[in-house]
Amino acid sequence: MKDVIIATTNRGKVEEIRRLLSDQFDEIHSLLDFQDEIIVNEDSPYYAENAMKKARKVGDHFGMPALADDSGLEVAALGGRPGIHSSRYGRNDEERISRLLKELEGLPWETRGAAFKAYVALYLPRKDRCYVFYGELKGYIGFEKHGSGGFGYDPVFYSPELDKYLAELSTEEKNTLSHRGRAIAALKKFIGNKKGLGTREK
């Protein structure tokens, strides 16, 4: 398949998505590969709409298929926060984790339920079509950081299904089982079932 551009400058996301989709596209670019400054106002309260906005803006700018995701961590005890604002909960991963743990301080394990949610949008500019795929991973927020892998909230997110914190997973395990990995698995299945539609922008 032909080129696609990932609509993000987040290196962790870029590497994760590249590994997951290396067998689907000839070349996988990201905004890190270009000097163009693309500003997208992610003002929607819905993950899917923000993902579509990013994919459309970047796809139209570069004239190639674009992939964007909007994801977040929703903690039940915090009324679903940080949610749509997960990436803006602090200036960096350390600040975001520190704020989250402080807000949950004193709460017992059984009340620390959470879910990672991801919406991945694939936009085909020549066809003016946008497709959205969803993935979710349920778990709990721990009391301290564990593991040295991953990024974002991975060190404090425990998955009973995997019996590990996300930062303790190998890259291959996380790519297969994470919320984003599951959304992209749905995307790959869609591409395989829709070869006539495909991502070949000829």
Image: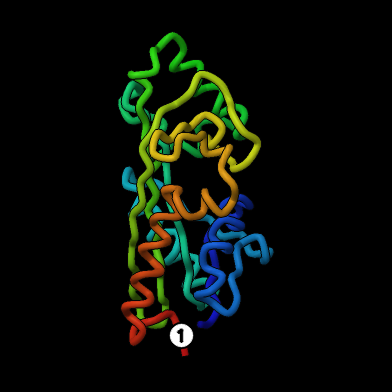
Tag 1 residue: 201
Residue at x 58%, y 26% (from the top left corner): 145
- The image shows residue 154 at horizontal and vertical percentages of 53, 37
At which x and y percent is residue 187? Answer: 38, 66
- Residue in view at x 59 percent, y 28 percent: 146
Q: Is residue 188 left or right of residue 36?
A: left
Work out whether 16 lies above or below 2.
Answer: above
Q: Is any atom of residue 83 visible in this view?
A: no
Looking at the rendered structure, the kind of residue marked 1 is: Glu
Q: Residue at x 52, y 22 (%)?
A: 99
Q: Residue at x 32, y 80 (%)?
A: 194
Compared to 186, does 165 lie above or below?
above
Kindly state the secondary structure of the residue where label 1 is placed: loop
Percent position of residue 62, x then y: 55, 74
Residue 95, located in which quarter of the rendered image?
Answer: top right
- Crowding around mark 1 (Cα neighbors within 10 Å: few <14, some 14 to 19, many 20+) is some
Give the tally of numbered discs.
1
Residue farthest toward the top in the current orientation of the protein: 106
Say which quarter of the image contains residue 131: bottom left
At which x and y percent is residue 56?
42, 66
User: Along the line of sight, which residue is nearer the eye, 85 or 194?
Assistant: 194
Q: Is residue 173 above or below residue 187?
A: above
